[in-house]
Image (cartoon, helix red, strand yellow):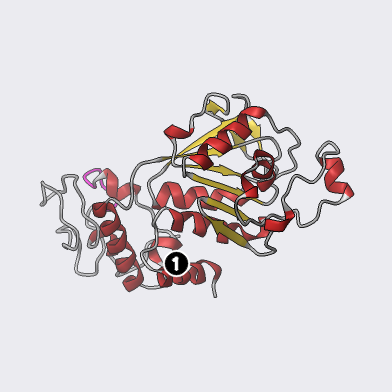
């Protein structure tokens, strides 16, 4: 995506602490940068004098929307959240394994990392390179056994047909849940939550609507681990500090997680954002 002509929203709405030529102490939020031309283009664009923070901010549909006014309102809201402490540099743990459905969590990690300034920490049973179902390679930086719930704000689990469920991941899920921190799983990912026993206490959804013979064989002939009395056949479910989703609902899943961490001030903001992303 390219910058919208005559916009300049990112040069007006947010505060900039870095030194700018003509504004050595940076600029406050809502103040027009002195380096903006009359047509709202940047005089420093492409030049080494341009602050790194400006160069690093890239246009995106989430931020820019369909109009300059949307971008201004979005950036003002982001500035307000930052000042009020609504956004903080917490860490989110993401479980990874070979043949995981990476697309189911990448939009969630984008919103968490780019929009909410969270550090995304990939983990796995071993520190070996992970190859997703989509063919992308990921490098875990910590093992599940060494990860501690106290160090993170949330735990994300993608879908995929991984039959290996070790004690350490069940213990980790329980630790996140009992400490009141986010546990989020999508598609077949809620199976881990079921085996950890936390779905006994909350409503949930999953792509595994029925435990068929094919499902049984895919998971080493294990019996259905899901407490079906708590299952809701819908796109995404948020109950207490647990978010679950069907695989096709990865956008809903991502937005629900972002909402959990305070990205949206009002319910209308969340709905408008969903409509913009989905083109409704």
> On the rendered structure, is 14 left or right of 97?
left
- In the picture, the quarter occupied by the N terminus is bottom left
Q: Residue at x 75, y 42 (%)?
A: 161
- In the picture, the quarter occupied by the C terminus is bottom right
Point out residue 80 in the picture as x, y percentages from the top left corner. Answer: 26, 59
> On the rendered structure, is 59 left or right of 160?
left
Point out residue 94 in the picture as x, y percentages from the top left corner. Answer: 55, 39
**Placement of 277 over or under 224, stated as above or below:** below
> On the rendered structure, is 61 left or right of 278?
left
Q: Main secondary structure of the magenta part?
A: loop
Asked whether residue 46 is in view, the answer is no
Q: Residue at x 15, y 49 (%)?
A: 26
Q: Secondary structure at mark 1?
A: helix
Of all residues shown, which one is farthest toward the right?
A: 213
Point out residue 30 in the picture as x, y percentages from the top left corner. Answer: 19, 63
Q: Residue at x 70, y 48 (%)?
A: 188
Pick the residue in front: 112 or 52: 112
> On the rendered structure, is 254 left or right of 63?
right
Could you say which quadrant of the image residue 170 lies in? Answer: top right
Crowd rating for badge 1 (residues with CA inside 10 Å; few <14, some 14–19, many 20+): some
Please give the range of residues in magenta: 45-50
**Residue on which disc 1 sits:** 270
């Amino acid at each position: 995506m390219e910058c919208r002509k005559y916009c300049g929203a990112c040069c007006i709405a947010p505060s900039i602490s870095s030194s700018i030529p003509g504004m050595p102490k940076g600029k406050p939020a809502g103040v027009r940068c002195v380096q903006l031309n009359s047509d709202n283009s940047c005089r420093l664009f492409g030049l080494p004098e341009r602050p790194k923070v400006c160069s690093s901010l890239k246009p995106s549909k989430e931020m820019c929307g369909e109009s300059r006014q949307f971008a201004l309102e979005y950036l003002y809201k982001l500035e307000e959240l930052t000042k009020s402490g609504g956004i903080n540099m917490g860490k989110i743990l993401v479980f990874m394994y070979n043949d995981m459905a990476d697309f189911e969590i990448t939009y969630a990690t984008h919103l968490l990392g780019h929009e909410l300034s969270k550090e995304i920490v990939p983990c796995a049973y071993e520190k070996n390179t992970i190859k997703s179902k989509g063919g992308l390679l990921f490098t875990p930086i910590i093992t599940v056994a060494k990860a501690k719930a106290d160090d993170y704000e949330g735990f994300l689990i993608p879908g995929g047909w991984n039959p290996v469920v070790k004690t350490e991941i069940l213990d980790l899920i329980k630790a996140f849940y009992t400490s009141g921190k986010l546990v989020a799983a999508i598609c077949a990912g809620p199976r881990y939550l079921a085996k950890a026993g936390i779905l006994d206490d909350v409503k949930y959804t999953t792509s595994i609507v029925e435990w068929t013979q094919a499902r049984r064989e895919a998971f080493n002939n294990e019996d259905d681990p899901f407490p079906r009395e708590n299952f809701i056949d819908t796109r995404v479910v948020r109950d207490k500090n647990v978010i679950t989703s069907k695989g096709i609902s990865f956008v809903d899943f991502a937005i629900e997680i972002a909402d959990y961490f305070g990205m949206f001030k009002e319910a209308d903001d969340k709905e408008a954002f969903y409509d913009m992303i989905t083109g409704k």
